[in-house]
Amino acid sequence: MSGPLALLRRSAVVWAPASAVLVAGQAGLLIADPVPLGTAGFLTLALISLVLVIAAVALSARALAVAASGARVTWRGVLAREASSSWAWAAILVLVTAVLTVLLPPLALIGVLLIVAIMPIAGRGSMRVWVHAGAAIRVAPVRGVLLGLVTILASVIIAVAALLLGFFVTGTASVLATWFLASVAALKLLAGATSYASRSSAVDRSGVKNT
């Protein structure tokens, strides 16, 4: 078992380039000056944006899960067959979050909470994410609640920061700053959730309840 910072340090070989591609890619999409008019060009750019987010979430969650298992984090290990659940759940959850955002932006918070709760388990190669997520909450309910509250607070701060950046900074610099801050926050939340899930799983196997 390792703390969030240790997990981030050990898995940086994967999440660092994945996050860099995400941030640079999102900024690069601005070159096309997309306008949400439902055109084929805009839909293509939106699809590319979603793919970039899905890839970053799937790779980062998988790398953190490998680090939490005690194994050495390598690209080969992260892309192994067991990573399929990470990619599947990342696609589902990112799409759900995108749909909720379009329907009503504040609803995106539900998607973010689901990503933080489920991706650390999906990254371990399990498709039974609800079972394991429920088990983690039963073992350490207080930590689970605290993690949820921190996720909500971080999401609100990033949303406010994005609005301020959009107002005071324009163009590519605004997009770069927004996605960089969002990536940093997301990585820290995923690392914290992965550490929580790993510790809860270990305690559950030992039969000792923890808060």
Image: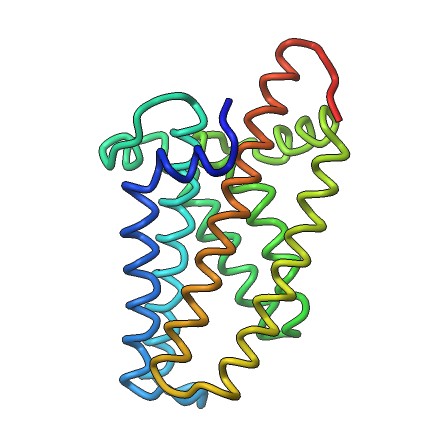
Position of 134 with respect to 98 (left or right) is right
The quarter of the picture where residue 30 lies is bottom left
Q: x%, y% of residue 187?
A: 46, 49
Rendered residue at 53%/35% (across/down): 194
Rendered residue at 44%/53% (across/down): 91
Most distant residue in the left direction: 76
Q: x%, y% of residue 76?
A: 22, 33
Q: x%, y% of residue 51?
A: 35, 61
Q: Is residue 53 above or below residue 168?
A: above
Q: In this view, does 40 lie above or below 78?
A: below
Q: In this view, does 166 lie above or below 152?
A: below
Q: In this view, does 56 lie above or below 182?
A: above
Q: Which of 170 and 63 is in front in this view?
A: 170
Quadrant in which the C terminus appears? top right
Position of 102 with respect to 29 (left or right) is right
Q: x%, y% of residue 64?
A: 42, 36
The quarter of the picture where residue 125 lies is top left
Q: Which of 149 and 6 is in front in this view?
A: 6
Rendered residue at 37%/37% (across/down): 9
Position of 145 with respect to 198 (left or right) is right
Number of callouts in the render?
0
